[in-house]
Image (tube, rainbow, N blue to C red):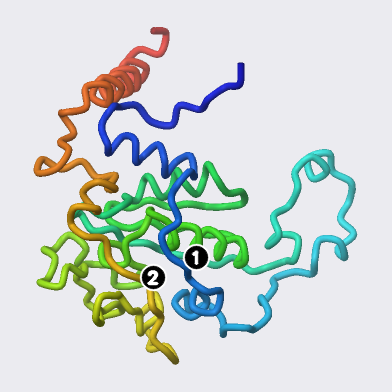
Amino acid sequence: MAYEPQYYPGATSVAENRRKHMSGKVEKLREISDDDLTLVLGHRAPGSDYPSTHPPLAEMGEPECSIRELVEPTPGAKAGDRVRYVQFVDSMYNGPSVPYVRSYSAAINFRGVDPGTLSGRQVVEARERDMEEIAKFQMETEMTCPALASLRGATVHGHSLRLPEDGVMFDMLDRCRKEGDVIIMHKDQVGRPIDKKVNLGKPMSPEEAAKRTTIYRVDNVAFRDDAEVIEWVHRVFDQRTTYGFKPEN
């Protein structure tokens, strides 16, 4: 019998959505072109070559290494790409994902990544073309709603403020706006104006966001409503505390 990974406990919709994000089995909701992705990330000009920090691995003539022979390098590592980042911010108002879940998703489903998790933001560092693959995956799927999640490489603050009347998460640098029934991005992730507006697609309705979110909220799915999650959080806390106090246990 094949082993089925158990990514996250719980019987609620929030627990199920977390399992989907962690497993990578998420629904694709929109298309972001490669040039548009490059524009909003802001690391290089669309259509330009990937800058490198070293020659391709095949040209470097490195010494024999059993580990190197076992581990297939990522496309970015093979080509010698520099390391770059993508950083997401998720609204607390039923945003589709949360920083820890984004980190789990990146670490479980992609190789050569360095995810970082803070209270209200999540960053992934990787070789540039590998990072773009992760960014595109998360932006095109149900892991992201263009109104309730955004790319913010700088000045991330404001995600926890109330949503304005149009339902788009507050942004001090005004990177995203709602125009008609879609969200457009007219600045890159650090707030620099870009040459054209990038259409990020339609925002989720409040009902759809509440259904797809991975955030526990008392006005949607409360954390304490999921008995199995509570049990496992208590178990982890108890075992970490017990080990720290008396390792022989």
State the residue position of label 2: 153
The C terminus, quarter of image:
top left
Which element is circle 2 on? loop
Type of the residue with mark 2 = Gly
Mark 1 residue element: strand
Q: Residue furthest bottom?
A: 195
State the residue at coordinates (67%, 68%).
81
Where in the figure is residue 141, as x and y percent of width and height?
43, 56
As drawn, the label of residue 85 is 1
Pointer 1 local density, CA inside 10 Å: few below 14, some 14–19, many at least 20: many
Q: Is residue 60 left or right of residue 193?
A: right
Query: Can you give x and y, in whole percent of width and height, for residue 15 in the image?
Result: 31, 34
Quarter of the view holding residue 156? bottom left
Q: Earlier in the sequence, mark 1 or mark 2?
A: 1
Bin the neighbour count of mark 2 within 10 Å (Cα to Cα): few under 14, some 14-19, many 20 and up.
many
Relative to the observer, which residue lies in front, 17 or 51?
A: 17
Q: Is the C-beta separation of discs 1 and 2 under 8 Å?
A: yes
Residue lying farthest top? 249
237 to 61, vertically: above or below: above
User: Residue flagged by tag 1: what amino acid is it?
Assistant: Tyr
- Which part of the image, by quadrant, shows the N terminus? top right
Residue 147 x %, y %: 26, 67
Name the side, left or right, on which 169 lies relative to 81.
left
Q: Taking 205 as reference, is 224 above or below it? A: above
| Residue 94: percent from left, percent from top | 21, 52
The residue at the point 67 percent across, 77 percent down is: 51
Give the distance between the C-alpha atoms of the residues marked 1 and 2, in whole angstroms. Answer: 8 Å
Is residue 102 left or right of 61 when viewed as pictured? left
- Residue 236's quadrant in the figure? top left
Quarter of the image for residue 128 reads bottom right
| Residue nearer the viewer, 153 or 95 | 95
